[in-house]
Image (cartoon, rainbow, N blue to C red):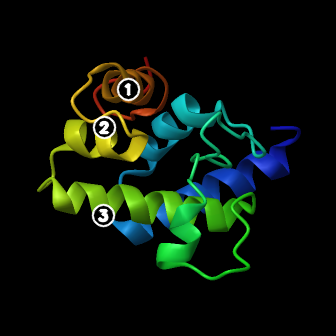
Amino acid sequence: MPNRESRLEFLRSVHYEATRAGLDPQLVLGLIQVESGFKKYAVSSAGARGYMQVMPFWVKLIGGRKDNLFHLRMNLRYGCTILKHYLDIEKGDLFRALGRYNGSLGRAEYPEAVRAAWEKYWHYSPKTAGR
């Protein structure tokens, strides 16, 4: 992120949208790291867009025609809502929900990559604080 203000806005937005959806904001940061490498205008070969790599078909399913998936809050709201939807479908099974999110259900690489990024870079534990 180019400057402190941008980073703080990003982190506040992640916290707000993740918490709103009932997700751990630190998990969402791990997912963003894996999905887009924190690139706002990332576009995958499949056409997924933004930080959380949301597929455009979701706009037609759950949003409004003019929703911009490159807008920070919009992208985070869609991504968090979709992940929460998949967690509900999978009855809290994060491994399977992440597989659904990425379209790789049944393969371990993606869920393990998100879990590793979450635990290595973003997971806060009072036991390890201050080390």
Earlier sequence position, callout 3 versus callout 1: 3
* Amino acid type indicated by mark 2: Gly
Residue found at x 26% / y 46%: 97
Residue 67, by quadrant, is bottom right
- Disc 3 crowd rating (10 Å Cα; few below 14, some 14-19, many 20+) is some
| Residue neighbourhood size for the residue with mark 1, other residues' Cα within 10 Å, grouped as few (<14), some (14–19), many (≥20) | many
Residue in the image at 55% along x and 35% along y: 35
Distance from label 3 to label 1 (Cα)? 18 Å
**Residue reaching furthest to the left:** 91
Residue 41: mark: none
Q: Which residue is mark 2?
A: 99
When the figure is inspected, residue 99 is found, relative to residue 72, above or below; the finding is above
Residue for badge 3 = 85
Marks 1 & 2, CB-CB < 8 Å contact: yes
Mark 2 to mark 3 CA distance (whole Å):
13 Å
Residue closest to the far right:
2
Q: Secondary structure at mark 1?
A: helix
* Residue beneath disc 1: 110
37 versus 65 height, above or below: above
Q: Nearer the viewer, residue 131 or 19?
A: 19
Quarter of the picture containing the N terminus is top right
Amino acid residing under circle 1: Tyr
Q: Position of residue 78 (x, y in %)?
A: 52, 65
Residue type highlighted by circle 3: His
**21 left or right of 86?**
right
